Amino acid sequence: MTEAPGITGHWDIDPTHSRLGFSTRHAMVSRVRGAFNTVSGSADIAEDLSQSTATVVIETASVDTRSEDRDNHLRSADFFDVETYPEMRFVSSAIDEVDEGSFIVTGELTIRDMTKTVSVPLELIGIDTDPFGNLRAGLEGSRRIDRKDWGVTWNTKLDSGGVLVSDKISLEFELSLIKKVDEEAPTDSPEAADQEETSTFPPAPATEAAPTAAPETADEELPPPPPVKPVDKPVEQPSQAQPSEKPLGKLFGLR
């Protein structure tokens, strides 16, 4: 088993960062390249590689060669016949590590309901964590097949004696896989732990309240108030004229 860290586990193909392409000769002189834009799949890698599995599913209608007319022709019954066979599928039967980080994945490739065994060499480019915390593995490889083995036989002869489309198709794999990590159970916060610990203690016994005096009722008779002694007012005496110190006769010199 490879010593690459974290290689074991369940991996899902990331279609946004993966490419499953192909190329072939056109008119015997140029090379046409294309790809399938809708690809899904997964791999379950065990410590014992003989127990590992991989599956890849391709939507045939997603073929893209940057030419609408050519793509429509590839979707027709002359090639993929996407209305009748909407998918191509690869299911592994064996995964072998032939060198450090080099693998041979053997399995059944089904195209147009015809299944053939193929082996695909793949190189592990590396394993690393992206900025979003995803553990990613990169794999690259290629494999040449003969399209006639799956009943894809349409062609046109050239005046030179050659054919318009080569029977040999090179498959190109550039895969980015994301490892599925089981979610960890949330840890309790210290506050929650304190609350839980507090709840384990029995509640303190209730203390018996001291009896309080009952308020006096309104019907209870009160003693009469003491009598109020009237205040004696002084009797006003008529004012008397005070005699002057000297008689009036003396004042005017009379005797």
Image (spheres, rainbow, N blue to C red):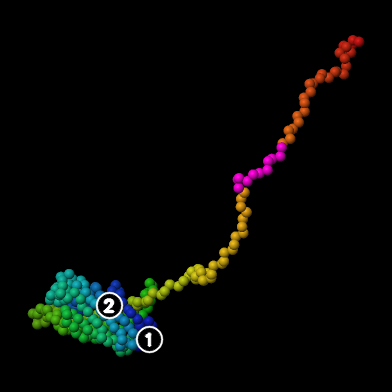
Tell me what residue is drawn at x 87 percent, y 14 percent: 247
Tell me what residue is drawn at x 37 percent, y 82 percent: 6
Relative to 231, is 143 above or below?
Answer: below
Q: Which residues are magenta?
A: 217-227
Disc 2 marks which residue?
41
What element does badge 2 sit on?
strand
For mark 1, does the 10 Å Cα neighbourhood hold few (<14), some (14 to 19), or many (20 or more) residues? few
Amino acid type assigned to the residue bearing label 2 in the image: Gly
Q: Main secondary structure of the magenta part?
A: loop
User: Is residue 16 shown left or right of residue 162?
Assistant: right
Amino acid type assigned to the residue bearing label 1 in the image: Glu
Give residue 253's position: percent from left, percent from top.
89, 11
Foreground of the two, 133 or 196: 196
Disc 1 marks which residue?
3
Give residue 37's position: percent from left, percent from top.
24, 73
Q: Earlier in the sequence, mark 2 or mark 1?
A: 1
Which of discs 2 and 1 lies nearer the camera? The answer is 2
